[in-house]
Amino acid sequence: MNKRITTLLILVGALMKALLRGRANRIPKLPPESIVGMLLTKNVGDMIFATSVFRALKEKYPTCRLTVVGSKKNAITLSGNKDVDRYIVNPESAWELVDLLKMERADYGFTLANSSSDIATMFLAGVNAIACFDVQNAPGAHTRVYSLVKNICIQVPYYVGQYCSQEYLRILEPINIFSTNTSKYLFYSTETRSKVRDQFLKQGTDIEKDKIAVISPGAGTKSKLWPAERFAEVADFLVEHGFKIAVIGGPGDKEEVELFKLKLKTINILDASSLSLEELFYFISKCKLLMANDSGPIYMAESFKVPTLVVVGPTDEFEHPPRGPLNVVVTPNRDNEAPEMRGHIMGYSEEKAREQIQKVTVEEVLRTLNILVEKIA
């Protein structure tokens, strides 16, 4: 059956069930025995943010069973995470997912995306109480369908422009969890450690001992890209300060990675762009510094307490980048101009977004980086 038709049937079925049997907006009996969390995005950064939620849940209710539904890619993101009891890779059939969730007999469920299909799926699966976000300060954040379907749920206020990690944690407030711990959690196996370390030892680099700075010139959303040649200028500065340079990037970042390597003055560069996701976790965890656009590798570094410098243009520097004495952000002079992609709301101007990231100069980045390097030393 066509996926759009299936989704429509799921939504209609949920609304009819709500009319006949009532909504899922009552606080469940505490402590809950079983909880379902849904985050179907392929975006690794979003799932890393969600690990704070999973940890807060298990610290408050350690015996509660937590089932997470997500993409196949993010199964790797949560590999080794003991806060998650079961990970369900989102199946092709929405009806199959409904059947899988029915077996969980969940007392509470939540979606971390503004997804009407997430809500409808959990509702048809018999989840007793469902929480979803209600964005308070961005009128265009909700589709008409979501605005209708969210009335089935416990609606939790969400504020665009606030720290996303803390806003995610609000989804647990209906079950009496009020956490401010926004730490992120990633893991890798001993096999992965041995494999990757040996790989670079053969190239003359001990990533657990050498002073390595990782540069990630790519990003999933191309309008967030700071020019790769500017990253290369900054990398040359780091070489002068005793760092070995490593470059990383995913399959969609090949152009930026190659341009970065081409513009570098140094020829001694570690190319880690072919590492798998779990291998990348280990590699980043052992480096001394990571510099990137506002993208997933920044949150990988944050998970392992690795110092970071983030170049931010069209996204909101208060929403995503890590916060701490060794986490710095460089933004353009805003001149009272709001970040074009604040809240990742649909309908932003790509041209304006690119203009905002282009305004960040190498000189501004070097001034900030010099202070950070002194702190690291």
Image (cartoon, rainbow, N blue to C red):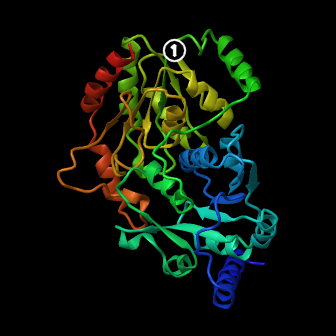
The correct choice, above or below, for 144 with respect to 328 in the image is below
Q: Residue at x 53, y 11 (%)?
A: 210
Assign the C terminus to one quadrant of the image: top left
Residue 276 visible in the snapshot: no
On the picture, is 349 further left or further right than 276? Answer: left
Q: Could you say which is closer to the camera, residue 329 or residue 354? A: 329
Circle 1 residue: 268
Q: Could you say which is closer to the camera, residue 361 or residue 135? A: 135
**Where is residue 276 drawn, in percent x and y?**
68, 35
On the picture, is 310 further left or further right than 218? Answer: left
**Where is residue 305 drawn, in percent x and y?**
49, 28
Residue 352 position by quadrant: bottom left
Q: Residue at x 62, y 81 (%)?
A: 23
Q: Residue at x 67, y 89 (%)?
A: 16
Residue 340 visible in the snapshot: yes
Other-residue count near label 1 (Cα within 10 Å), few / some / many at <14 / 14–19 / ≥20: few
Q: Amino acid at mark 1?
A: Asn
The correct choice, above or below, for 193 with respect to 291 in the image is above
Furthest residue toward left: 335
Secondary structure of the residue carrying numbered label 1: loop
The correct choice, above or below, for 224 with respect to 205 in the image is below
**Where is residue 244 drawn, in percent x and y?**
48, 15
Q: Could you say which is closer to the camera, residue 101 or residue 96? A: 101
Give the number of callouts.
Answer: 1
**Where is residue 320 drawn, in percent x and y?**
42, 46
Residue 52 position by quadrant: top right
Residue 108 position by quadrant: bottom right
